[in-house]
Amino acid sequence: MERPAPKQNELCGSWEMKEKLGMGGFGNVYLYQHLKIALKLCRLELSQKNKDRWSREIHIMKKLNNVNVVQAREVPEDLASIALNDLPLLAMEYCTRGDLRKMLNKPENCCGLKESEVLALLSDIGSGVQYLHENKIIHRDLKPENIVLQEVDGKLVHKIIDLGYAKDLDQGSLCSSFVGTLQYLAPELFESKPYTATMDYWSFGTVIFECICGFRPFLHHMQPYPNKYNIIDLLFFSVRETKTQLPLSALRKVWGEAVSYIRGLKEDYLRLYQGQRAAILSLLRYNSNLTRYKSVLLSQSQQLRAKLAIFKTSIQHDLEQYTKQTDTGISSEKMLKTWQENEKKVDEFMEVADVSRLDDEIVALHSEIVELQRSPFARRQGDVMEQLENKAIELYKQLKAKCPDPPHGYSDSSDMVGTIVQMVQNQDRVLKDLYTHLSKILICKRRIVDLFPEVEGAIVKIKASNAEVMQMQLKRQKEFWFLLKIACVSGKPLINSHTHTHTHTHTHTHTHTHTHAHTTL
């Protein structure tokens, strides 16, 4: 018994018909809300042959179970009553993101999908086709309209639908019936030759080509533009000859290429901006390392300067005292010469400890880096580009909306060319500023790289000077203790051997001791 087609918001038990999703080869697809399922109803006007195909589609769908093939569901009892012509209903999972054709029709995809999206499609549908073939089934009608998208755990999954033309190969591996959609058919079908499961590979390859390029590779008279036009040449021609009228059939594709070109300019800037951010982060890491080196340098320098100040004060005092007592006390030319040399070395070590030049250079470099961070060019400047991209997309939408099907008529490209010119001018200005900013970053980084060996060398010299000062001080301490030992043995102040020589045996003994000390020191 024939029944009228369901109406929107019509209730069937606890189920409400929300909308008509589309149509397949033999039936219309409706969305019923209660649980999220899609319901496919057979058309009223189907021939007996197509009714058999309808039943076969339901049979095939119910026995399949793969994540990349739309799953069949049990028809709820409340909905069984709406079946038409007493043919069974087909209940399927509802894929909320629509079909691949809907995605390809978006202006931003007019020149093809992103590489990551194409790779995901290849993986999913390739897996689904392989599953069908492993189960002895040829789909025979692969096209963007028969690939739907479902979001699963935040990831888009592609699924094959509409097995109305599917062929079960249990009865033999060769087929000969002419089915499918012309733009995606394998050559053997046009030549009325027998075919196998490989026809699905041809259709799938054609779909992938369209997803990459934005247009189908074959049957150009069914393309949205004639094959005789070269799109890139037409785009350049449109820019040069803004007011020249072009066929709408060609212009639509030219403007699609223009949208892609404008988006490419924006993405070029964004990539360079990301590179600039990476460069400034790298510069900051280098600067952080230089800051640590500077801290070590200043610390070592301060320690050395403090030791040198004490050492110099002490040795100057010792030299003064030595001069005062030479006529009545101890004299040692060797010790005196050593002390005088040490005094000169202190001045040399003071020069080593002086790192003011390096410190000033590092401070100046830090200031430049802070200015680079505060620079307006360090912040994203792509807002105007995004506005122009959106304007180009809107122009493309308007052109597409006014194109009849099939497209005919003529129009010029003045609006789109104006947008292209603005985009190029804006990109030139922004890139010039960004390149200047980036060059300053690289110069600062180069200066830091050049400073590292200087700072490291200064630290090594300071440490070596520090160690030598300690050795000089240790030697002086040994000299004093040796003199103290001599003084303790003599029991009285020692006199110069050259002045007092013949007075007493005891004195002679002490003079001999003094001479020995003079030689040792």
Image (spheres, rainbow, N blue to C red):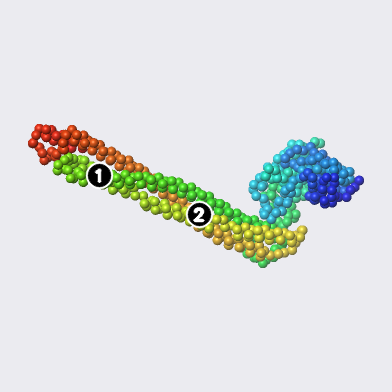
Kindly state the secondary structure of the residue where label 1 is placed: helix
Q: Which of the two residues, 52 or 194, is positioned nearer the viewer here?
A: 52
Residue 6 visible at all: yes
What distance separates the C-alpha of mark 2 from that of mark 1?
50 Å
Q: Which of the two residues, 377 or 327, is positioned nearer the viewer here?
A: 327
Q: Which residue is mark 2?
A: 373
Residue lying farthest to the front in this orientation: 491
Q: Amino acid at mark 2?
A: Gln
Q: Which of the two residues, 256 or 41, is positioned nearer the viewer here?
A: 41
Q: Which residue is mark 1?
A: 315
The residue sitting at 23% across, 36% down in the picture is 481
The quadrant of the image that shows the C terminus is: top left
Determine whether 344 is above or below 247 in the image: above
Residue 133 visible at all: no
Residue 432 is situated, as x and y percent measured from the top left of the image, at 53, 59
The residue sitting at 39% across, 53% down in the picture is 360
Q: Which of the two residues, 461 or 215, is positioned nearer the viewer here?
A: 461
Q: Earlier in the sequence, mark 2 or mark 1?
A: 1
Determine whether 221 is above or below 460 in the image: below
Residue 270 is situated, as x and y percent measured from the top left of the image, at 58, 54
